[in-house]
Amino acid sequence: MPEAPKEPQKATEYDVEEKNKKTLEFIEDVTANADQVQKRVLAEILSRNAHVEYMKRNGLNGHTDRETFKKIIPVITYEDIQPDITRIANGDKSPILCSQPISEFLTSSGTSGGERKLMPTIEEELGRRSLLYSLLMPVMSQFVPGLDKGKGMYFLFIKSEAKTPGGLVARPVLTSYYKSSHFKNRPYDPYTNYTSPNETILCLDSYQSMYSQMLCGLCQNKEVLRVGAVFASGFIRAIRFLEKHWALLCKDIRTGTLNPQITDPSVREAVMKILKPDPKLADFIEAECCRELWQGIITRLWPNTKYVDVIVTGTMSQYIPTLDYYSNGLPLVCTMYASSECYFGVNLNPLCKPSDVSYTLIPTMAYFEFLPVHRNNGGINSISMPKSLNEKEQQELVDLVDVKVGQEYELVVTTYAGLYRYRVGDVLRVAGFKNNAPKFNFICRKNVVLSIDSDKTDEVELQNAVKNAVTHLMPFDAHLIEYTSYADTTTIPGHYVLYWELSINGSTPIPPSVFEDCCLTIEESLNTVYRQNRVCESIGSLEIKIVDAGTFDKLMDYAISLGASINQYKTPRCVKFAPIVELLNSKVISSNFSPKCPKWTPGHKQWNNTN
Ligand code: AMP
């Protein structure tokens, strides 16, 4: 198997050019030999795990070849292995899915039964994640030279963790990574030279973390060559934070003293190493922030910035206009595609337009298979997606090197950590090839209708939440005739909007407080990731807009005028198309917001968590 590039240990030993060359050779090598690498990855996973309970249960009998594997092992979703996951979570340490000990659970933003999915992981997976990260900058430096001469201002955060009843830690994959020695004790590398000290990233209090990261970024503004966050929504939240707090930040920069609300001693110590009284810089920042328009604020405050490094593919594309505005059209760079299950691939042409972004899957990360997607009526987000595959469908899965350009597929992975033929839930389209490894456009997450940040709300969840909420209308003899929803990102943070058309038979007018109760009931009914994002203020209060009688008939007329078939027309449960949103907004009678945050606690509701 091609060897991953080795890490040098000291700054003096560091040869950027040499390291970049080795990394690019590695990419050439694994993509040229994609099929052989995949074959070896599968054989390695299967031979290591030949004796685990899952393999015995399915009767693979130690076979390690693709043909037998595909014949014997079923293609599954999370629900199929949930009983196994629950056993591991409850403390069963026997090798159920993986021969190596499960080191922790990674909590996915994908949910099952309203709770985050738990992805088992093993210690060595951290090495694979680090490897994928190490590919990003050598690729980037082919297009933007000199990035080793300055810093990256990245807003990175950890989230709270929980313990399963059996004592395993459960936390998001990035929290796990930032807390690992792979990140904290990373060897010297000019490409992981960030303006945020580790302590500011590792602070759980989101205000202190954001404030201190922003302050350090401003203090080192001239050194910053690239800015970013993981997802576009996170970066926009940081700009919003600056809008709210620039006066306080400037005060700290002017005086060289730190806001007393930053109470975490390690954060204070780390920030005080960077913060020096700088009245000139404070004046400059103040003058820029005082301007009425914040267009181009990124390039004004961080004048040497070459690009914005954030994911703007998938639902994050809704933030492109806002990012363009704040960055004066700097390139928006999507570098990688990853998940809690597995890190998948990198964008080898990072300066391309967001709409052209494609990710090359790195064949050493896992064994990949692809289930062709057959669209029915052009849609793939329908709730009628089959849950488990029949025999014929199981045979349709193709290997990495056998996918066809232009065809859409659902990604299926077999990982070192014990997921076998697992449907990730992402739909990808083949954009082309890098040597023998395909490059994929990210199309969508199956079934998701609404998303603002890491939340992924599907049609069924929305439907149930609405069903719970309408009970508040019963005393008024009012009924919901039709509804749809919209992810409104014109507000920061964005929020869910529901458009409701009612039939009201009772004579008592419905007071606004009742609609507010409906908003809160919907929020309380949505999944844990939504509620956590609400509590962390990454999503704003849910809004119900009551529309005039007959609005949804007009919506249908409009859809039909655009060519929809009258027989097959169904009210879309989510709208995105601007003219339709405008039509709905023109019919709004009243607007109502959730009066408070829904309840949320870390961990699964079945667990007794103390933190
Ligand atoms: P999680 O399991 O919470 O880590 O979320 C992983 C999911 O986020 C993936 O399965 C995708 O649906 C989405 N995702 C990750 N990277 C990207 C990307 N570069 N573009 C679009 N969606 C992404």
Image: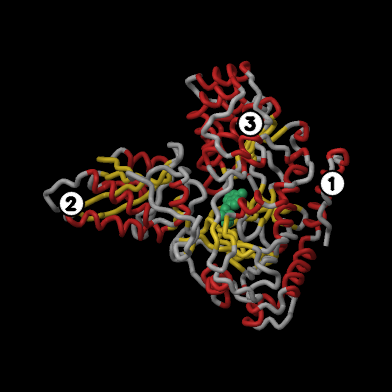
Q: Tell me the residue that label 3 is attached to.
A: 217
Q: Position of residue 487 (x, y in %)?
A: 43, 45
Which mark is on residue 68? none
The scheme the figure's colours follow is: secondary structure
Q: Tell me the residue that label 1 is attached to.
A: 8
In the rendered view, would you say 416 is above or below 585?
below
Q: At label 1, which amino acid type do we have?
A: Pro
Name the residue rendered at 85%, 40% in the picture. 14
The Cα–Cα distance between marks 3 and 1, rounded to whole angstroms, is 27 Å
* Quadrant in the rendering for residue 395: bottom right
Q: Position of residue 333 (x, y in %)?
A: 64, 40
Q: Is residue 328 visible?
A: no
Mark 3–mark 1 contact, CB under 8 Å?
A: no
Say whether residue 237 is left or right of residue 588: right
Which mark is on residue 504? 2
Q: Secondary structure at mark 2?
A: strand
Among the two numbered marks 2 and 1 on one chain, the one whose residue lies closer to the N terminus: 1
Ligand 1 under 8 Å from disc 2 Cβ = no
Ligand 1 under 8 Å from disc 3 Cβ = no
Name the residue rendered at 45%, 44% in the picture. 539
Q: At label 3, which amino acid type do we have?
A: Gly
The Cα–Cα distance between marks 3 and 2, rounded to whole angstroms, is 54 Å
Q: Secondary structure at mark 3?
A: helix
Q: Secondary structure at mark 1?
A: loop
Q: At label 2, which amino acid type do we have?
A: Ile
Front disc: 3 or 2: 3
Say whether residue 505 is left or right of residue 112: left
